[in-house]
Image: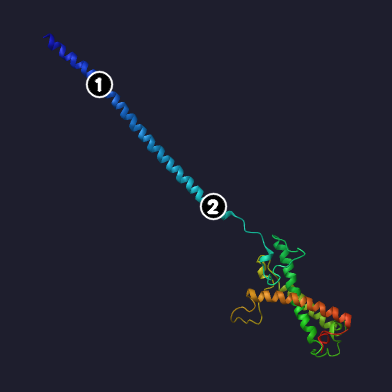
Amino acid sequence: LRGAEAAPKQVAAVGSQSTLPMGLVGMVGAGAVGVLALGRSGQARASTVACRVATVADEAPAAAEAEAPPPPFDPSKQLGVTAPLGFFDPAGFCKVGDEEGFRRLRVAEIKHGRVAMMAAVGAVVQPVLQFPGFDKVPKGIGAVLSPPGTYGFAALFLISGALELFLWKDDSSKSVDSIGDYGNPLQLGFGDPMGASEDMRNRELNNGRAAMFAALGIIVAELATGKDALQQLGF
């Protein structure tokens, strides 16, 4: 009987002794699960942050390229820069970034070049070919100082001024390459635009520059020698 009464107590003691380790095991297991969960959560957050950083790093150059300002205006890359002199501006009139100043100079250059080309050719042709009623006009530059040559010069001046004021106007909202492009009246709407190529426009600028020297030389030579343009050529 004494043994029977002691058996339940021993079983209870053994049960209480085995319960403590099992509780510890459960706590340790729960802690391990929590640590693993936190580790995975931390890895997920780190991965998300890394992706966001990579995305921002990829977008930064694209945004910088999109917001980058255009390069400054460079006069050395415009029409008229041809061999052998290339960009020839020893006086430094054309500044990098000064598009408005370049525009004014290019407008004047094209106008003066075109007038000079007509003047140089006219100075050579005028002594041998005259309009009816102008046969008594002096040859050479004296024609613009003697009637009716003076009347013809005044009429030419007024007509040219009217065309420039009302028809041949440059649009400042367009690029400098469009300066002097007033269309071609001889095109008649057929074929490719005549004189619109870069090569032809460079030719016009260079011929106009040469004609300005030629016209000035003809005038100075006539004032110095009294010979008209045709006589200066030996005819």
Residue closest to the eye, 75 or 67? 75
Query: Is residue 156 shown to the viewer in this render?
Result: yes
Residue lying farthest to the top in this orientation: 2
Label 1 SS: helix
At label 1, counting other C-alpha atoms closer than 10 Å, the crowd grade (few under 14, some 14-19, many 20 or more) is few
Q: Quick check: 156 above or below 108?
A: below
Quadrant location of the N terminus in the rendered image: top left
Q: Could you tell me how far apart the alpha carbons at marks 2 and 1 are, in whole angstroms? A: 64 Å
At label 2, counting other C-alpha atoms closer than 10 Å, the crowd grade (few under 14, some 14-19, many 20 or more) is few
Residue lying farthest to the front in this orientation: 84
Residue 219 drawn at (x, y percent): 84, 79
Residue 123 drawn at (x, y percent): 80, 83
Residue closest to the eye, 189 or 207? 207
Label 2 SS: helix
Residue closest to the eye, 187 or 177? 177
Q: Name the residue carrying label 1.
A: 19
**What is the quadrant of residue 197 in the picture?**
bottom right
Q: Which mark is residue 61?
A: 2
Q: Tell me whether the residue at label 2 lies in contact with that at label 1, contact meaning CB atoms closer than 8 angstroms.
A: no
Q: Which mark is residue 112?
A: none
In the picture, measured across the screen, residue 61 lies left or right of residue 137, that is left
Disc 2 marks which amino acid? Pro
Residue lying farthest to the left in this orientation: 1
Residue in the image at 40% along x and 41% along y: 44
Residue in the image at 21% along x and 17% along y: 14
Q: Quick check: 46 above or below 104?
A: above
Residue 104 drawn at (x, y percent): 74, 66
